[in-house]
Image (cartoon, rainbow, N blue to C red):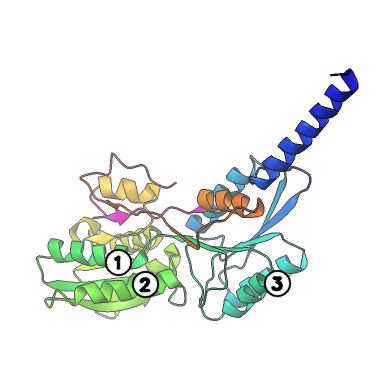
Amino acid sequence: MSGRLIAAAFVLLGLFSMASMVRAGEWPGDRTFLVGFAQDHMANDWRAAQVRDIEREFARYPFIRFVYTDAGGKTAQQVVDIENLRARGVDLLITSPRDAEAMAPVISSVYNAGIPVILLSRRTIGDDYSLFIGASNRRIARQAADFFAERLHGKGRILVLQHIPTSTPGIDRTEGFREQLANYPGIEIAAIKRADSLRHLAIKAVEEALAEGIEFDAIYAQSDSMATGARIALKQAGRDPAAIPITGIDYIGEAREAIRAGEQAASFTYPTFGREGAEYAIRILRGETVPKEVTVDSLMVTHENVDAIEPIF
């Protein structure tokens, strides 16, 4: 075979290999993609960590340009942020809807315009999204109810510090808890105080409960940030947090220290899903098929296993 024919054969082989790689979903590397994350509230340390986890993962991919917004805990602003990200021409949208129902139309409009949508930790009403990644909040809530039933020996009153009630985690963490408590007639909910997973609101909520004379034997905080606020309020009121079983959700570093100190009875791991969100975003942009839902396991953490499980941040 002549040198010219050999060279031509190598060119054809190279073209065939490149086409095969693209068909297989390998990255062609010929453009930059804009990924936007419409975040709810960066003042919440868990949500700030979620953004950092996504940023860290996307930093490995030079063809990804990542931007995020902060709605400051306002549903209307989060809707506007999504509309603005769409106007900027994002190739993929990531969001965590503060209000599952109110935000459904804008999320649907983005999805139906052909822009992939990944929902992290919070769902929306309907199926107009590409992928949901989260944990089972109802399962966590039921485990929390079982835990309290054991700790309280089947009798007592529980103060609930509620996550955002319009969000699907807030709904599931409350409804699942109620459903499971129905199996324990000696245990009742003393009150539900909304605190939106913010420490200062949890401090205020517990202060209000104490001022109103609400009697409670335990606190079910639907996030560890609220559990921290509860401990602060109890201490300020001269009450020992170690004498009141408190559970949280997320398992952040301060929860680990509180469990070690005996000031928090339990927590449940609830990762930010940022790493998974970024990884699946890359797969979607590559044209790969991904599942509609990905469920990440959650573990209950108590003094028995606190040293063996690393906090999420």
Q: Quadrant of residue 200?
A: bottom left
Asked whether residue 41 is in view, the answer is yes
Assign a secondary structure to mark 3. Answer: loop
Badge 1 vs badge 2, beta-carbon distance below 8 Å: yes
Label ID, residue 289:
none
What mark, if any, has residue 113 been given in the picture? 3
Marker disc for residue 141: 1
Magenta stretch, residue numbers? 262-273
Q: Quadrant of residue 246?
A: bottom left
Q: Residues within 10 Å of mark 1 (few under 14, many from 20)?
A: many
Tell which circle, 1 or 2, labels the residue nearer the N-terminal end: 1
Q: Please report the residue visible at 30 percent of the width from the left and 72 percent of the height from the top.
A: 176
Query: Is 61 or 160 nearer to us in this picture?
Result: 61
Q: Residue at x 41, y 69 (%)?
A: 169
**Separation of disc 1 and disc 3 at Cα?**
36 Å
Residue 282: percent from the left, percent from the top? 62, 49
- Name above or below for residue 1 compared with residue 65: above
Three-letter code, disc 3: Ala
| Left-right relation of 153 to 72 | left
Q: Secondary structure at mark 1?
A: helix
Q: Residues within 10 Å of mark 2 (few under 14, many from 20)?
A: many
Reply above or below: 204 against 282.
below
Nearer the observer, disc 1 or disc 3? 3
Tell me, yes or no, whether the two marked residues, 2 and 3, touch with CB atoms within 8 Å.
no
Tell me the kind of residue under disc 1: Ala
Q: Nearer the viewer, mark 2 or mark 3?
A: 3
Calculate the distance from the C-alpha at mark 2 to the C-alpha at mark 3: 30 Å
Residue type at mark 2: give it. Asp
Per the image, the residue denoted by label 2 is: 172
Relative to 165, does residue 146 appear above or below in the rendering?
Answer: above
- Coordinates of residue 71 in the picture (x, y in percent): 61, 68
